[in-house]
Image (cartoon, grey):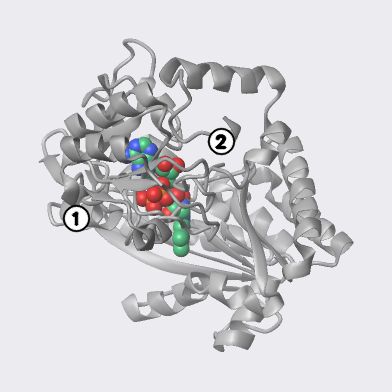
Amino acid sequence: MIDKKHLKAFIEMVGKENIYDDKAHMIAYSYDATRTRYEPDAVIFPRDEHDVSNILKYCNQHLIVITPRGAGSGFTGGALPANGGIILGMEKHMNKILEIDTQNMVAVVQPGVINMDLQKHVEELGLFYPPDPASEEYSTLGGNVSENAGGMRAAKYGITKDYVMALKAVRTNGDIIRAGKKTIKDVAGYNIAGILTGSEGTLAILTELTLKLIPKPKYKKTYMGIFPSVDNAMNAVFKSLSAGANPVAMEFLDQLVIQALIEKLGVNLPTDAGAVLVGDVDGNVPEEVEFQLETLEKSFKENGAYEFKIAKDNEEAKELWYARKNASQSITIFGNKKLNEDISVPRSMLPHALREIYAIGDKYGFKVPCFGHAGDGNIHVNVMIDALQIDMGHQAIKEIFEMVVKMGGTLSGEHGIGTSKAPFMGIAFNQVERQLFSDIKKAFDPNGILNPGKMGL
Ligand SMILES: Cc1cc2nc3c(=O)[nH]c(=O)nc-3n(C[C@H](O)[C@H](O)[C@H](O)COP(=O)(O)OP(=O)(O)OC[C@H]3O[C@@H](n4cnc5c(N)ncnc54)[C@H](O)[C@@H]3O)c2cc1C
């Protein structure tokens, strides 16, 4: 429960209507997509950056812990108030698209804007905001920048960090800072916007984002390659890309996922398929799209694909995408609980990484269906367990992380560290590197009031 004296101070700052402290709302705000629960003491909705500044200054003086929150769709507990205190909800007021500068092709937005709202808005103007996490319909751009979110289009267009040109943020002492510019080039000073991108709400509160836009490509086509084995498909990924293919997306389904899709949803895929790659190619002229498709087909076939399909129209494109879009829900046939990780490896290591992942699964007797963003090396690894196997499941995950890091990969390609992966940070970073993280945290937040415990900080 929040102390009455603090509640009164917050009411004076933002008004009673912008604060929740009742039990029902504390329960509602105790979750994110991890489904772990921590109740806050209050939820406060700042109206603008001055409210954010006043709240932070007060909390810093009184050592009240703050957890910033967008839509709460995070997969690693970043928006959970693991140490109580207040949640700063950015979605209620700070959700406006402030400017679309069509001449410089940038958008200036508040952090509570939903990703898809920006995409739709700029597409009406012939522009394109490519980062497309699967949560794009509800996740906020503030959450996307704080998690450095990626999506299916990352293979060609990169991830959120590639679109953050500048931002405004509030430090725990209440200072409002600007970092970056609308310019393409800016090498003056430290790249503070770069440090804040992916910082999971541990350093400062983001209050304004300047995001790069690009022209919207005019033509798009969907393809699917069917392979006898995962090894064939994984070789086709990096070999087709190094042969000059530049697909928007190259998504992967393994044999277990294909089996689940057929059994649970009756998806029309060959029962003997060992793996599938599906994705889009795009371009500004039809010839560019044709070139992409020819390059992919040639390379896929050289790497063992026995079928290469191209969707004739939108309906067929939707059919090809259906399998990938329903992969996650179908694999529940293998266990009632999944430990879902999102490792990422250099693309040439994909065949080796997948072999090792299945070997670790076999060792523990777990099915490990895998799918995801093969075109950028980011694979969703799902260790399927039942409720009594959680410890063993985590042991398997630890071995997977150790193997991935050894081959030059990372613990997380897009979901971040939060609380869920904090215990594994020692696998990926040595003592000296972790000390540097702590030093950066101290420079921004000397009293440790912002999202403590996240990323192991
Ligand atoms: C079904 C589903 C699919 C998903 N698919 C993807 C995917 O394809 N790619 C991907 O990358 N992620 C994916 N995610 C994870 C999640 O949606 C992303 O991490 C997203 O960026 C979180 O946005 P949010 O607004 O929900 O942020 P929240 O979950 O509310 O917060 C995320 C982090 O950002 C911090 N934060 C939020 N706003 C601010 C702010 N203004 N200032 C400072 N810190 C802030 C929070 O403290 C927290 O640490 C998926 C999630 C779900 C449920």
Residue 136 locus on image (x, y percent): 35, 58
Q: Is residue 77 left or right of residue 67?
A: right
- Of 5 and 409, the residue lying toward us: 5
Drawn side of residue 340 relative to residue 59, left or right: right
Mark 2 vs ligand 1: CB under 8 Å?
Answer: no
Observer-nearest of 416 and 133: 416
Question: As shown in the figure, which amino acid type bears the numbered disc 2?
Answer: Gly
Crowd class of label 2 (few under 14; some 14 to 19; many from 20; radius 10 Å): some
Residue at (52%, 56%) from the top-left corner?
37
Q: Place residue 109 in its image quadrant.
A: top left
Rendered location of residue 6, percent (x, y): 30, 35
Please name the residue shown 81% across and 58% down the image.
392
Amino acid of disc 1: Glu
Q: Residue furthest top?
A: 189
Q: Is residue 59 above or below residue 26?
A: above
The total number of labels drawn is 2
Quadrant of the rendered structure where residue 424 is? top right
Q: Nearer the viewer, residue 17 or 334?
A: 17
Give the labeled residue for mark 1.
Answer: 123
Instruction: Say which element carries label 1.
Output: helix
Quarter in which the C terminus is drawn: top right
Residue 94 spot, x, y in % from top left = 20, 44
Between the residue at mark 2 and the residue at mark 1, the CA separation in whole angstroms equals 39 Å
Residue at (29, 20) in percent of width and height: 185
Q: Which mark is residue 384?
A: none
Please give the label number shown on residue 453: 2
The single residue placed furthest to the front in the displayed view is 4
* Extreme-right residue of the structure: 363
Find residue 68 and report its image quarter. Answer: top left
Q: Secondary structure at mark 2?
A: loop
